[in-house]
Amino acid sequence: MQKLKGEAQANKDHMLQYKEIALVNEVVLKQIESAYEKFKAEADKLKKSLEDEIHFLKGRVSELESDLLSKSTEVTSAVSGKEEALSSYDRLSKVKYCLFRNVNVGCNV
């Protein structure tokens, strides 16, 4: 009987030991879950922030492309105007030369 009581006590001690291990594992699991939830929240916040920044930058790129197109059109127009003015100046110079030299040959302007 004493032997059975000893075995029962040893089994009870083992059971308590396993129960303590289970409780510790449960606490650790809750800590891991909490850390995971914190990490997930921070990752989601960072993801949202980066998505917002991407959206902003895409808008900014679009604005810059539009500005570039506008400036390019202005430059093309200005160059065309300058070329036209230069052409007119060349014609005017030929007329002045012809008038100054009083030459009619080759002065088809």
Image (cartoon, helix red, strand yellow):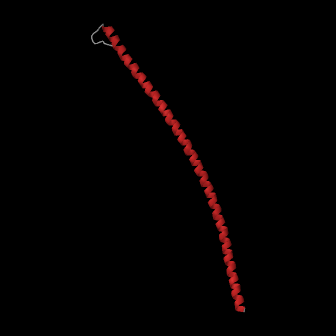
**At 69% across and 81% down in the image, what residue appears?**
13
**At 38% across and 16% down in the image, what residue appears?**
89
Asked whether, in this view, residue 10 is left or right of residue 55, the answer is right
Asked whether, in this view, residue 84 is left or right of residue 30, the answer is left
Q: Quadrant of residue 84?
A: top left
Q: Quadrant of residue 8?
A: bottom right
User: Quick one: which residue is furthest to the left in this view?
Assistant: 105
User: Quick one: which residue is furthest to the top in this view?
Assistant: 102
Vertically, is 101 above or below 87? above
Toward the viewer: 61 or 90?
61
Residue 50 point in image, percent of width and height: 57, 48
Residue 70 point in image, percent of width and height: 49, 30
Residue 48 point in image, percent of width and height: 59, 49
Toward the viewer: 65 or 93?
65
Toward the viewer: 79 or 48?
48
Residue 100 point in image, percent of width and height: 33, 8
User: Quick one: which residue is furthest to the bottom in this view?
Assistant: 1
Q: Quadrant of residue 55?
A: top right
Vertically, is 21 above or below 91? below
Asked whether, in this view, residue 106 is left or right of residue 14, the answer is left
> Across the whole image, how many numbered discs are drawn on residues?
0
Give the quadrant of the N terminus: bottom right
Give the quadrant of the C terminus: top left
